[in-house]
Amino acid sequence: MVNDPLAALPKVAWGKGIHIYDQDGKRYIDASGGPATFCLGHGNEEVNQAIKEQLDRIAFGYRYHFRSDAAE
């Protein structure tokens, strides 16, 4: 049997702003999120809406063959 070092870590369920929450509802400051999380936060409604609108148009385009206007 292999010892899984990740098994003891809390399981993240969701995030809002600078916080993440585990499956038991315990809140943590997300100090490991990366650049997008640090500047935008989790669950940013304005960003989420822009993503949804873009996904309704096209989900992915190769940047080397096409271009599009930047979302502001």
Image (cartoon, rainbow, N blue to C red):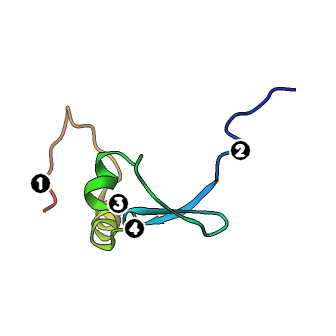
Question: Of discs 2 and 1, which sits in the foreground?
Answer: 2
Q: Earlier in the sequence, mark 3 or mark 2?
A: 2
Q: Earlier in the sequence, mark 2 or mark 1?
A: 2
Residue depicted at 34% across the width and 54% down the height: 37
Q: Earlier in the sequence, mark 4 or mark 3?
A: 4
Disc 3 to disc 2, C-alpha distance? 36 Å
Image quadrant in which you'd find residue 52: bottom left
Q: Amino acid at mark 1?
A: Asp
Identify the disc placed on residue 8.
2
Q: Work out whether 71 lies above or below 46.
A: above
Identify the disc placed on residue 55.
3
Residue depicted at 33% across the width and 62% down the height: 41
Q: Amino acid at mark 3?
A: Leu
Mark 2 packing: few (<14 Cα in 10 Å), some, or many (20+)? few
Which is nearer the eye, 54 or 42? 42
**Residue position for label 1:** 69
**Relative image position of residue 58 (x, y in whole percent):** 31, 55
Q: Amino acid at mark 2?
A: Ala
**Relative image position of residue 67 (x, y in whole percent):** 15, 44
Disc 3 to disc 1, C-alpha distance? 14 Å
